[in-house]
Image (tube, coloured by chain):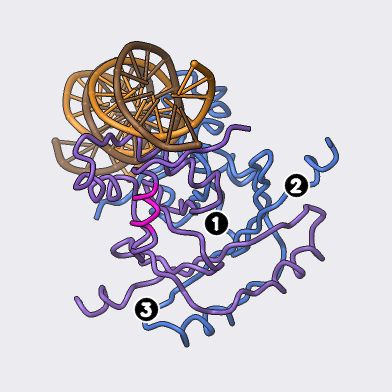
Chain colours: A blue, B purple, C orange, D brown
Amino acid sequence: MSDFRNSKQRLKIIEILKNTKSHPTADWIYGKLKNDFPNLSLGTVYRNLNILEKMGLIERIDFGKTFDRFEIKIKKHYHFVCENCGSIIDLNIPIEYNLEEIARNNTNNKIITHKIQFYGICEKCIEKE
Amino acid sequence: MSDFRNSKQRLKIIEILKNTKSHPTADWIYGKLKNDFPNLSLGTVYRNLNILEKMGLIERIDFGKTFDRFEIKIKKHYHFVCENCGSIIDLNIPIEYNLEEIARNNTNNKIITHKIQFYGICEKCIEKE
DNA sequence: CTGGATGCAAAGGGTTTGCACGTTT
DNA sequence: AAACGTGCAAACCCTTTGCATCCAG
């Protein structure tokens, strides 16, 4: 197993992810980083996102959309996905660990964790109508 | 809005999806169809899968994997995903509509539906260890 | 006959990767 | 010095699409 060094690019990616709620794509992060690293390549962003995921610092969100999105791993939470504009919003409701119990009683597969997504129309899109 | 005609290929795709629990990829379906339609093209499979989704007959499952998977839409249910082999298994536990109520009380976004995935190691992979 | 469906192949588009060079330790 | 990280560009790979032809209604 290789260990990781610090790189300015990587640290900046972490900083960006810590300071946004927007669950950005690799390309969006790339755009932000361009200011600090004019020669930055998209490949580096992707490589670092994969590394950060392996390090357990960030989480990949990849349901239902064309590109992956990323977020800093802080506290477990569920997501709301707007079916109109595609934006992803963190929800602040309690984690239902009892669901895992229910599932365990129903299957012989070993259940480790779970995710929930809620779908609908976000506040902003409702206003626009 | 356009309406759809019947095509032998499309009917066969439905039949295949009705008779498998495996949440197949487009390519897997393509392989199955090849027997009946030697000249079949992958593009046709993709086109039909998109049409069937629009018709509301099938559902696209696209969390966390490189290719999309599909299943016949029957009864709403949750999925279990094996983090080792990637297989997807239907779970037979009750749908927790009260979760949507809880979420509604927490956000101004309009919540229409929700999905849950459980992650872990499937029975088969446990046996292999 | 009309417009959707197909096959074929090329194009898309997000992500990964090989290579030579630059940096961290 | 050794090994990881970066930039660049090409390669990947799943999916979509244009076009001429076919076929269902």
Alpha carbon of mark 1 to alpha carbon of mark 3: how far? 26 Å
Q: Secondary structure at mark 2?
A: loop
Give residue A109's mark: 3
Q: Amino acid at mark 1?
A: Lys
Q: Earlier in the sequence, mark 1 or mark 3?
A: 1
Compared to B89, does B34 lie above or below?
Answer: above
Mark 3 Cα within 10 Å, few/some/many (few <14, many 20+)?
many
Amino acid on which disc 2 is placed = Cys
Describe the element under mark 3 as helix, strand or loop.
loop
Range covered by the magenta-colored residues: B11-17
Question: Magenta stretch containing residue B14, yes or no?
Answer: yes
Pair 2/1: label in front: 2
Q: Please give the residue where the numbered disc 1 appears in the rendered image.
A: A73
Residue that mark 2 sits on: A122
Pinpoint the chain carrying mark 2: A
- The answer to whether residue B68 is seen in the rendering is yes
Chain letter of mark 1 equals A
- Residue type at mark 3 is Asn
Residue B40 horizontal side relative to residue B9, left or right: left
How far, Cα to Cα, is label 2 from label 3?
Answer: 35 Å
Of the numbered discs 2 and 3, the one sitting upstream in the chain is: 3
Determine which quarter of the picture holds residue C7.
top left
Q: Is residue A119 magenta?
A: no
Tell me the residue at 63%/56% (across/down): A79
Labels in figure, total? 3
Q: Main secondary structure of the magenta part?
A: helix
